[in-house]
Amino acid sequence: MTLLFDTSALWLEIPDEIHTASWQQSESIELAGNRWQAYCNQMSLHTVLSYLQEAFGQDAPQTIDPANNPQCWSMVNGSVITVGETRFVIVPTEAMDKREFWVPQEWIDIPSWIGDYYLAVEVNPDDRLLQVWGYTTHAMLKSQGVYDESDRAYCLNGSDLIQDIKVLWVVHDLGSEPTRAPVAALPPLTAERAEALIQQLEGVIVLPRLEVPFVEWGALLGEPDRLQQLCQQRERHASSVQSSVSVAPDARVTESRVTQLSRWFQSMVETGWQTVEELLTAQPELEFSFRAEAIADDIIRRVKCLRVGTAETTVLLLVMLQTESEQQISIRVRLLPTIHPVLPAQLTLALCSTTGDVVQSVQTRDQDNSIQLKRFRCPPGMPFRLAVSLDGITVSEDFVS
């Protein structure tokens, strides 16, 4: 493995075999956003593991842990490597913003999951690179981290992380630094309650970790056998759903590949999408569709041309992103006409969950020249779907924030 150092971080190349195997092993995850999270965790774990095996030589790290499997990664971000008695928790993200380090509560408050050192990892799958940009300890996260109840995560200021990874090996060898803070035991679950929770959470739920109180969720995950049972149940449920999916005979649905919105913040433009500027350069006659659009400098806009209805009328799907505090992304979605000055009547734009449930929708009337969903917010990694329907035909676009 090639190791690339700078003064502040450790860079690791993601080997091709790890990249390929990670994607293949994550394909069993049904929801696109959860699948992507599992894929990033798999790459991070095995790339860092290879590095640690080189660094520690005979004291080979171990990865045998119930939290290190794709189904668990689809629920909780992070993995763990054990070197002797020391636990390294790896928390990957695609975000380039290093102002804050977010760690799911599971890694802090479930006694059997607690680590000694927490590695902040940025993953760049396209360039096959991984950056370990800093580390901290459980004690530091517990004492100085800010707990976000809505996301069930501890947030530590990025400037409080130690960025020189070489310091970690020195401190680890000395063994003089207290790494863990005391954590109270979670009340055990009865067998009946554990079974009920597993049944409740086995379905297609985007964020099962937020569905039940943490004391119950943490107690469930803290029992390896129960965690394994939950993962197996979710995998069986996903397989049964995939094998039974059918489309009504009077409807046609066209779906596209999943669009990773995090890449838009890195100035990437995915296939099928354009910046508004590129679109207007190629088709200046569409300027009228954007004439009333006043845009702040920090808003990212991408547009895609869709064909809708039996007449295959072309419309523009405009998605606008803006970063907000607490790692929330603000999203606005609009439909605009192309050739004609107005949109077709009874054209519907809907925001849906990946299970197909409509969260909100809006429909055109006669002579509407645009329609827009109410602004919504997503945490990083949240999957959702935009559906455009006309004449019984639905065109859908899947996204991960």
Image (tube, rainbow, N blue to C red):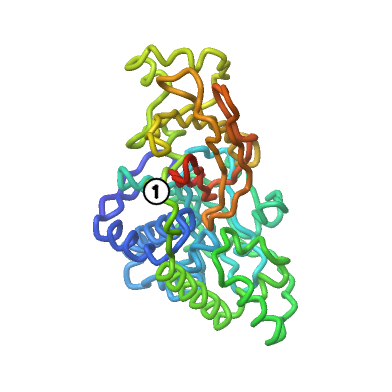
* Residue at the image point whose x is 36% and y is 72% from the top: 60
Q: Is residue 36 left or right of residue 103?
A: left
Report the label total.
Answer: 1
* Residue at the image point whose x is 45% and y is 47% from the top: 398
Would you place residue 145 above or below residue 331 in this image?
below
Would you place residue 314 above or below residue 356 in this image?
above
Which residue is at the front of the view, 295 or 108?
Answer: 295
Which residue is at the front of the view, 317 or 157?
Answer: 317
Whether residue 268 is visible here, answered yes or no, is no
Q: Residues within 10 Å of mark 1 (few under 14, many from 20)?
A: few
Image quarter where the N terminus lies is bottom left
Badge 1 amino acid: Glu
Would you place residue 154 above or below residue 79 in this image?
above
The residue positioned farthest toward the bottom in the image shown: 191
* Residue at the image point whose x is 26% and y is 55% from the top: 15
Q: Is residue 274 left or right of residue 112?
A: left
**Looking at the picture, how far across and down is residue 298, in whole percent?**
55, 24
* Residue at the image point whose x is 51% and y is 50% from the top: 383
**Looking at the picture, how far across and down is residue 397, in whole percent?**
44, 44
Q: Is residue 216 left or right of residue 201?
A: right
Would you place residue 162 above or below residue 60 in this image?
above
Choose top left, top right, bottom left or bottom right for residue 339: top left
Choose top left, top right, bottom left or bottom right for residue 29: bottom left
Which residue is at the front of the view, 216 or 1?
Answer: 216
